[in-house]
Image (spheres, rainbow, N blue to C red):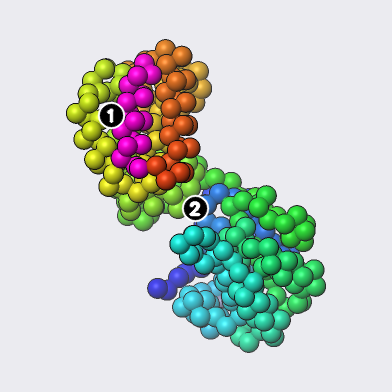
Amino acid sequence: MEKIFSWKNIVGNSDKIAQLKKFSADKKFPHALLFAGVEGIGKRKIAETCAASLICENPIDGEPCGTCESCKLMAANSHPDFYVVEPEDTKTARNIKIGQIRDLQREAFLRPIQAERRVVIIDGAEFMNKAAANCILKTLEEPPSQTIFILLTANRAGLLLTIRSRCMTINFDKLTAAQIKKSLTAYGIDDAKAQKLSVISDGSLGRALTLEKSGGYELRDDALTLIKQVYKKELTDEIIFAKGKIFETYSRENFSDFVTYVQKILRDVFAFNKFELYNSDLKDKIAEIKFDEENLYRMIAEGTQVQRRLKSNANLRLLAESYLMRLRMAV
Ligand SMILES: [Zn+2]
């Protein structure tokens, strides 16, 4: 798929984007950058746009021209001076291995072929294993002059201190609900759905898109329904067993998301008229639910407990059923 790289396509973090654009326009780009921030806020897209602007043959104020040979090669994802390393997923682990870093080093030390410099991206830098991290550290200590390194991480603390100190860190903020909504609408998602997703995606456009694809946003409605049933004492054994059967078909991540929604709604019931709500769009519905504080604490504790047990091998259906029963008993 052709990609168009332009700073205009980046949503949010405008001060940081202005800074990067200026670095590029002034030809004073730091040789190693570390982009930090939660998943799904556009770090990769921003890094790719940096690369496009650095590699473009006729950039205008740090904006890639979109028409030169380099821009065309970038759009086709086949520029010889642009290189990306990502973690490899196996059944048991997510890792960037030393072999991948050695390949990257070989590229990084070559003269550029098409552009004036090379750009390499390490996406998910916190997933470098120890050997890989030590290997890249050596390169960052004595970097090739023609190559710019951009490391991306959702967990800066998971990187060696020595790597962090060799890079200029840029911390990217979560996106606002309004920014996410605008992007979702631009993707052709209808207004009502975009509104809902923007509120529940916790500042991450990537998460909003995943939820949209998986139908995960319906989980929040299910969570609200469950809490209402508990509140109205309508959560019968029949409902619990029927739910258990449905949860059995879920992935553990899906069920975990469901519990997270329950927790956030319960927190909103507690916070009502005190703090800002997570689910501000559900304000009217949350106003109808009232639990004693003590009961709320008990319910929230059950959620924390089931999240912990989810990490073990416990049977999903039994876990879900016992969670619902415990919620019922907590009030
Ligand atoms: Zn260009």
Question: In the image, is residue 207 part of the stretch drawn in magenta?
Answer: no
**Relative horizontal placement of residue 85, taking residue 232 as reference (left or right):** right
Upstream in sequence: badge 2 or badge 1? 2
Which label lies toward us, 2 or 1? Answer: 1
Q: Picture coordinates of residue 48 (x, y %)?
A: 56, 67
Residue indicated by mark 2? 40
Ligand 1 quadrant in view: bottom right
Is residue 120 visible in the rendered image? The answer is no
Question: Residue, x 77% and y 61% (percent of image)?
Answer: 166
Q: Nearer the viewer, residue 195 or 242?
A: 242
Residue 280's place in the image compared with 2, above or below, is: above
Give the amino acid type for the residue marked by disc 2 in the picture: Gly
Is residue 151 visible in the rendered image? The answer is yes
- Residue 200: name its quadrant: top left
Q: What element carries label 1?
A: helix
Q: Is mark 2 on a helix, strand or loop?
A: loop
Span of residues in magenta? 315-331
Which quadrant of the figure contains the N terminus?
bottom left
Q: How far apart are marks 2 and 1 (CA)?
A: 28 Å
